[in-house]
Amino acid sequence: MRKIDALIGRRTEDHRRRAQACATKVLEAARENGYRVSLVGSLAQDRFRLHSDVDFLVHDEPAVGMRSAVERLVADHFRGTDIAYDLIFASDLTPNRVRDMLHEHV
């Protein structure tokens, strides 16, 4: 059983490292393109596991074409990985929910 636990632990850590690397690139590219994006959820809270996804909160109001541009930006950085992600647009949430997500992030 210990060998299985060790294997799962190594796979989980590898998955977390790859997810963090992709997320960092997304955040940098978003900033370079003028999008305000935050990492939220399990990766931001150091609760990332083998089957976790990466959650991004997009702060900007969706201008014409902005959603699809952000979606392409994120997809480009995660393409070819086995890492799932979610894009959450603040404009789709209540202000309280956005505040909660950001509070959980910190």
Image (spheres, rainbow, N blue to C red):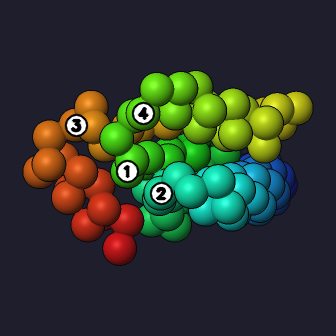
Q: Are marks 3 and 4 in contact (CB under 8 Å)?
A: no
Toward which corner of the image does residue 83 lie, by quadrant? top right
Crowdedness of circle 2 by 10 Å Cα count: few (<14), some, many (20+)?
A: some
Left or right of 70, for residue 22: right
Name the image quarter holding the C terminus: bottom left
Task: Report helix, strand or loop for mark 3.
Answer: loop
The x, y position of residue 63, in whole percent, is 42, 33
Quarter of the view holding residue 3:
bottom right
Q: Earlier in the sequence, mark 2 or mark 4?
A: 2
Residues at marks 3 and 1, CA–CA distance in whole angstroms? 10 Å
Marks 2, 4: nearer the viewer: 4
Q: CA distance from mark 3 to mark 4?
A: 16 Å
- The answer to whether residue 11 is visible is yes
Badge 1 element: loop
Q: Residue at x 75, y 53 (%)?
A: 22
Which element carries disc 4, helix, strand or loop? loop
Number of the front mark, 2 or 3: 2
Q: Earlier in the sequence, mark 3 or mark 4?
A: 4
Q: Which mark is residue 93?
A: 3
Looking at the picture, how far across and down is residue 36, in whole percent? 47, 57
> CA separation, marks 1 and 4?
12 Å
Badge 1 is on which residue?
59
Residue type at tag 2: Arg
Q: Amino acid at mark 1?
A: His
Give the Cα separation between the discs numbered 2 and 1. Answer: 5 Å
Q: Earlier in the sequence, mark 2 or mark 1?
A: 2
First in sequence, mark 3 or 1: give its number.
1
Residue indicated by mark 2: 36
Q: Which residue is mark 4?
A: 63
Q: Residue at x 22, y 37 (%)?
A: 93
Residue 78 place in picture, x, y as percent: 76, 39
